[in-house]
Every structure is written in C-alpha cells, then in structure tokens.
Amino acid sequence: MRVVIVYESIWGNTAMIAQAIARRLESFGEVRLVPVLEAGPGVALGADLLVVGGPTHAHGMSRASSRRSAAGSERVKGAPCGPGVREWLQRLPHGDGTWVATFDTRLDKPRWLVGAASVAISRRLKQRGYRQIVPPESFFVLDKAGPLKAGEIDRADAWAGLLGERVADELVRKRASTPEPLGAAPY
C-alpha cells in the first residue's frame, strides 16, 4: 500500500496528528509525510490512499488572512506563511477514484459552532474525483494554539489503523475482481 499524507500546521498540533497517522500507517506499507508547503500538485500520483489534514480556522480551511493573523501570534518555527491546503487543493490533479481520508484539528466544541476543516477538504477532494473511504475526522485542541487534548495522539493512531485496514481490504477486493490478461496461463 502506498500512502501520501499532506498536512498544514500552524502551531504544530496538526503536524503531531499527521505524524501519529503516518507512524501507524507504516505498518501497512510505504508512507510519505509531506508538509503542504513542500507538496507539489502531483505528490499523490500513484498513491492508494491520500490523507489530507489542516487546522480549522473560522469554521473551515485556513485562508491567507487567517494564516497572516496566526503569523502574528506564537507559532511553530517553519509553520506555513505561504499557501495552505486550500490553495494546494486548487492545483491538485483529478483523483481518478483514489481513496482519500481527511482530518483537522479544532476546538472541542460542537461542529456547528466552530466548524471543521476536514469537511471542506473532503468536499473539495470529492469534486476532484477522489473517493472518501471514511468520514472526515476531527482531533481536538484545548486552545487555538494547542496543546492537543489528552488522548488525541492515541485516537489518531486508532483512526489510522482503521484507514489502513479499510484500504487493505479494498485493495484485496480490487485484485480479486481484476480479470487475468488474455492469454495468461491459468497456473
């Protein structure tokens, strides 16, 4: 299984979740963990699963203005000042049915109150021809700059295990339904 994880992180919380997801998915195959600033539009070509995550800003994905605002507060060295997931998705080629999973970090309040970037990311990926394999997932922070709520790394690990199992099952089904090429020996 080939997995690509693209993430945006301002204060480091989303990066910690992405790293936990990557560690768990490594037990299923090859994993490439890519910060959004280093992710070209073709980064997911040939992947069996694309995982995309980012922080929730103002009810959805970050914008240039919300990243500028975050830049004025304390943030992790190397946090994006340039394009985020929103802009990266605009350049992403058609997914041709590649499986996708999305996640975000946000305050632990009702989604209708704070929003969830993962839902908007998922919607945009579906529009670009990707297939969602599990519902969007949120991981919680105690304040906008963090830290992560206790137990969220463990939840990310469990969620990644579910992703790995689902994609592995789908790959087995796909191989079982692919007919032998004409003229292939039966043994």
Image (cartoon, rainbow, N blue to C red):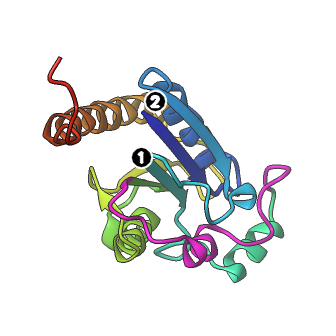
Q: Residue type at mark 2? A: Leu
In terms of secondary structure, where does tag 2 sit?
helix
- Please tell me which of labels 1 and 2 falls first in the chain: 2
Residues in magenta, as a range: 75-100
Q: Residues within 10 Å of mark 2 (few under 14, many from 20)?
A: many
Name the one closer to the observer, 167 or 115.
167
Name the one closer to the observer, 48 or 83.
48
Q: Which residue is found at the position 38% from the left and 66% from the top?
A: 122
Residue occupied by mark 1: 49
Residue 165, quarter of picture: top left
Q: Is residue 138 above or below residue 157?
A: below
Q: Residues within 10 Å of mark 1 (few under 14, many from 20)?
A: many
How far apart marks 1 and 2 lie (CA) works out to 10 Å
Q: Measured from the top left, where is residue 108 in percent x and y?
A: 41, 54
Residue occupied by mark 2: 25
Q: Measured from the top left, where is residue 159 in percent x and y?
A: 35, 36
Q: Is residue 100 above or below residue 169?
A: below
Q: Which residue is found at the position 62% from the left and 41% from the top?
A: 33
Q: Measured from the top left, where is residue 10 in percent x and y?
A: 70, 57
**For residue 45: magenta?**
no
Q: Is residue 14 left or right of residue 155?
A: right
Q: Measured from the top left, where is residue 35 in percent x and y?
A: 69, 51
**C-beta proximity under 8 Å, tags 1 and 2:** yes
